[in-house]
Image: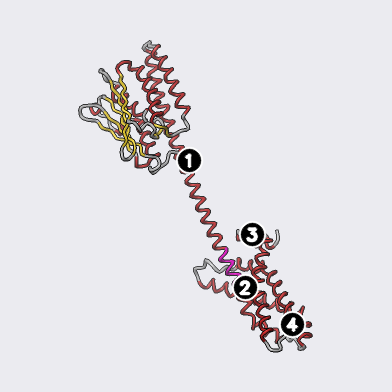
Amino acid sequence: MGFVSRVLQPSGIPLTTRQFWWYAFLYWIFFGMIWYSQATMVWLLTPNGRMYYTETLYWLIELLYWWGATPLIIYFAQRFPLQNYRKSYKLIGHLLIHLLIVSVLYAFELVIEYSLLGAAMAYERGDQITLRRVVMVFFMSYGTAFGQYMLLVVCYNVLIYVYRFQSLKQQHLSTELTNAQLKGQLANAQLQTLKMQLNPHFLFNTLHTIVSLMICNQTKRATLMVVTLSDLLRTVLARQEANALELQEELQLTKQYLAIQQIRFEDRLKIEYAIEPGTERWPVPQLILQPLVENAITHGIANLATEALIRISSRRCAEGVEIEVFDNGLGEKKKQSTSGTGLGLSNTLLRLEQMYGQTAHLRFEQPPGGTTTVSVLIPDLATSEHKAY
């Protein structure tokens, strides 16, 4: 790896060696052309003035010298930067070091120029080039050399600062995007976990019912329940990647689940639906109704000796769509509360919070005379705090 590549590497600026030399040439040719134009104008405006050929050679050597010294200047700019110093004495110390460096570089330039052109300049001008004259040239044009050197150092420090700031900004945006993606993946994983907990939950309850039927020698009903359960599981598995379904699809899953329960309760279970037109296409979390219906059966109507009723209804409201599951069970008489509704409803509440934030709700109503109504507000995904992933 060459010296230029080693100089460019710490900066992180995506420049090739060829680009570096090209930009350095443009920098020095700019000042060189100013100096040459200035010398030409002085020659033209001076009576009996003369433009010496050695002056052109002097200008060319000076241009090539500083162009070739650019990697060294950049190295010193990295070694003694002029930024990020809280204590002023460090900045002053680095300025003094740069003052010494430019003095050495400029003195060396004059030594090279007068070593190569001293004799030619003396011959062309007709006078002797003395050491005193070289020293006078050094002090007369030292300010210009120092200004060009320091401008390059300052420009490099500014360029590094801007580039690193942009890199950090881009890195910050990339980190935010990655965090957002990870947050979305985590939310999706949490939703999938909650949904996977629901599936075994009602599955085990159903299998327990099937075993009970078989113990009671009700083989025909147990077989029918197994077949119906198989159809339900097939439907759930076909949609396992989706966290949200249209309400009409969710109702179809719920009807399959209730078909299993009707085998269990026979003619004692009555199902009613009051679905407001226009709500069927509303997106809802998958398996959001099943735990509500299961809660109505397990904690509401399971111990009823009379006819059991479950009513599922939906209606539009200002916040979205509200879905209600009503049962005519014991309600408050059984001392049911939201704190003890089991895994199914707990996971339902967590899923609502995960998908919609605080814009969704899950409420219980249990009048003193019995019955229970569980209502769920499903807001619009586009305006909720969270998205379904």
Label ID, residue 149: 2
Q: Are marks 4 and 2 in contact (CB under 8 Å)?
A: no
Q: Using residue 353 as the reference point, say whether residue 132 is left or right of it.
A: right
Identify the residue position indicated by label 3 in the image.
Answer: 15
Label ID, residue 52: 4
Magenta stretch contains residue 297 = no
Q: What x and y, as percent, mark residue 207?
A: 41, 20
Q: Residue furthest left?
A: 369
Mark 4 residue crowding within 10 angstroms, few (<14) / some (14–19) / many (20+): few
Identify the residue position indicated by label 1 in the image.
Answer: 185
Q: What x and y, as percent, mark residue 294?
A: 34, 26
Residue extent of the magenta highlight: 149-159
N-term-proximal mark, 3 vs 2: 3
Query: Label 1 to label 3, Cα distance in Å?
Result: 37 Å
Query: Label 1 to label 2, Cα distance in Å?
Result: 53 Å
Seen at 47% across and 46% down, the residue is 180
Q: Secondary structure at mark 4?
A: loop
Residue type marked 1? Gln
N-term-proximal mark, 4 vs 2: 4
Mark 1 residue crowding within 10 angstroms, few (<14) / some (14–19) / many (20+): few
Q: Nearer the viewer, mark 4 or mark 3?
A: 4
N-term-proximal mark, 1 vs 3: 3
Query: Label 1 to label 4, Cα distance in Å?
Result: 76 Å
N-term-proximal mark, 1 vs 2: 2
Q: How many marks?
A: 4
Q: Quadrant of the N terminus?
A: bottom right
Residue type marked 4? Tyr
Q: What x and y, as percent, mark residue 149?
A: 62, 73
Q: Are marks 3 and 2 in contact (CB under 8 Å)?
A: no
